[in-house]
């Protein structure tokens, strides 16, 4: 194992993060702000620093700014039903800069009070344009199945957040049909052993899984670039 910036996220830090959410108090947060920064925010940013070379090797347009990549402990509650101001879960995205590449596919890492996980995901703000992924699957079925196999070898499991009830491609090969129903999809791993994120060995684990799953990210990004080239995703649609 190489020398990494990341040394781990301790049970004590996660417990404090949960207590901060439970208290939901600005006074409590301000009192423990530095502890939360040192125990949660900085280690999460260090993960990005340790993975940045690999991510740029996978995609030269990948955003590697740790500040932009990691979620904040303080929640923006505007427009949300829940008015709880603080998180008990944290995540980070490995993706192209969202202001220049909206809705791009991404890798992620996250943890909750009882679990952690990671994977590669692609969803779009408009469900219908996800059919560009279907088109690419049908065009390159063997490449797609190889990418699925790569994800399985990385320990990632397929899942979709939304799918068509109707068979949209009745003549497609049966082994492709589960994926051709999807309006979004991801390949993910989840574990309840939080001791595994309290060690630099997590970086080796993430590096291995991310690199093995590279063919899926490359497949997704090609479909995404097709969407951009065909004008299905326009940056101006996301500008405020």
Image (spheres, rainbow, N blue to C red):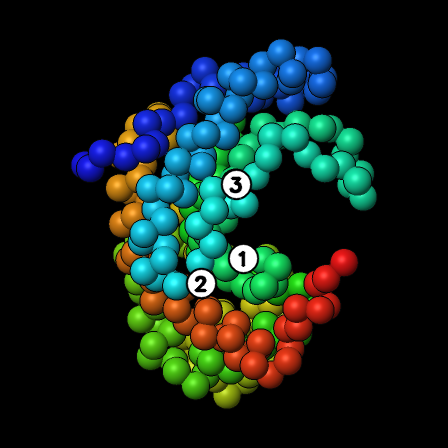
Q: State whether residue 192 appears in this view.
A: no
- Residue occupying the point 43% across, 19% down: 11
**Position of 114 relative to 28 (above/below):** below
Residue 69 placed where, x, y %?
51, 45
Separation of residues labelled 3 and 2 (CA atoms): 17 Å
Secondary element at image label 1? loop
User: What residue is disc 1 on?
Assistant: 97
- Considering every residue shown, the one lying at the far left of the view is 1
Q: Is tag 2's residue or tag 1's residue first in the polypeptide sequence?
A: 2
In the rendering, which numbered label is found on residue 145? Answer: none
User: What residue is disc 2 on?
Assistant: 61
- Residue occupying the point 18% across, 36% down: 1
Residue 41 in the figure: left or right of residue 124: left
- The quarter of the rendered structure image containing the C terminus is bottom right
Separation of residues labelled 1 and 3 (CA atoms): 12 Å
**Position of 50 relative to 195 (above/below):** below
- Residue occupying the point 36% across, 58% down: 56
Are there few (<14), some (14-19), or many (20+) residues within 10 Å of tag 1? some
Secondary element at image label 2? loop
Separation of residues labelled 2 and 1 (CA atoms): 8 Å
Are there few (<14), some (14-19), or many (20+) residues within 10 Å of tag 2? few
Residue 236 placed where, x, y %?
71, 69
User: What residue is disc 3 on?
Assistant: 67
Label 1 close to label 3 by CB (< 8 Å): no
Q: Quadrant of residue 150?
A: bottom left
Label 2 close to label 1 by CB (< 8 Å): yes
């Amino acid at each position: 194992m190489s020398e990494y910036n990341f040394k781990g996220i301790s049970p004590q830090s996660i417990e404090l993060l949960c207590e901060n959410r439970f208290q939901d108090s600005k006074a409590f947060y301000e009192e423990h702000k530095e502890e939360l920064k040192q125990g949660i925010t900085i280690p999460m940013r260090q993960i990005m620093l340790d993975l940045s070379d690999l991510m740029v090797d996978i995609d030269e347009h990948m955003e590697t700014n740790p500040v932009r990549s990691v979620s904040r402990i303080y929640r923006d509650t505007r427009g949300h039903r829940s008015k709880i101001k603080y998180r008990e879960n944290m995540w980070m995205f490995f993706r192209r800069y969202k202001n220049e590449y909206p809705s791009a596919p991404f890798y992620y890492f996250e943890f909750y009070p009882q679990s952690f996980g990671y994977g590669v995901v692609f969803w779009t703000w408009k469900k219908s344009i996800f059919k560009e992924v279907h088109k690419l699957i049908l065009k390159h079925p063997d490449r797609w199945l190889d990418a699925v196999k790569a994800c399985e070898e990385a320990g990632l499991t397929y899942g979709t957040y939304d799918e068509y009830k109707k068979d949209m491609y009745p003549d497609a090969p049966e082994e492709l049909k589960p994926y051709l129903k999807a309006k979004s999809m991801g390949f993910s791993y989840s574990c309840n052993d939080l001791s595994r994120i309290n060690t630099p060995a997590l970086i080796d684990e993430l590096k291995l899984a991310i690199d093995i799953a590279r063919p899926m990210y490359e497949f997704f990004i090609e479909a995404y670039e097709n969407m951009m080239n065909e004008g299905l995703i326009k940056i101006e649609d996301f500008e405020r």
